[in-house]
Image: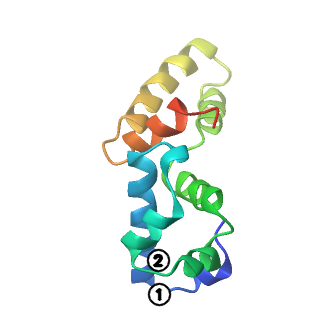
Amino acid sequence: MPKDTFYNLDQEKKQKVTKVLLEEFSHKPFSEVNVKSIVEKIGIARGSFYQYFEDLEDSYFYILDKNTRDIHLLFMATLKNNKGDIYKSLNEFGENIAEIIFDKDVYNLYKNRFLYWDE
């Protein structure tokens, strides 16, 4: 997760960093994203990036945490809400997960997350 330095940034700067990270991780698999392109798009020095995050992976998990949902927790909540009825829960979960994953604002982030899972 980001360092305190990131959280101490003014709101506008934090939003810019978050927006660039989301764009990068949505449009490329993790293995093709690099700090150089991120800092160039944000307009900061490379050292500033490392004041905000431990490394590239840290920034990636920040974006995933901020913009995606834990589908396992979603299923467990659905199962609990349906009092253990597995068939009803699976049907409802399928509908919910489709709405979440195919949302145009985060579709590519999910696609890259699950398509390149083994990285």
| Residue contact between numbered discs 2 and 1, judged by CB atoms under 8 Å | yes
* Left or right side of 32 for 4: right
Q: Residues within 10 Å of mark 2 (few under 14, many from 20)?
A: some
* Disc number placed over residue 79 in the picture, else none: none
Label 1: state its secondary structure: loop
Q: Quadrant of the N terminus?
A: bottom right
Label 1 is placed on what type of residue?
Asp
Secondary structure under tag 2 reads helix
Vertical order, 101 against 18 (above or below): above
Q: Nearer the viewer, residue 73 or 66?
A: 66
Instruction: Tell me the number on the disc at residue 10.
Output: 1
**What is the tally of numbered marks visible in this picture?**
2
- List the residue tagged with mark 2: 14
- Position in image of residue 52 (x %, y %): 60, 76
Above or below: residue 110 compared with residue 60: above
Q: Position of residue 10 (x, y in %)?
A: 47, 87
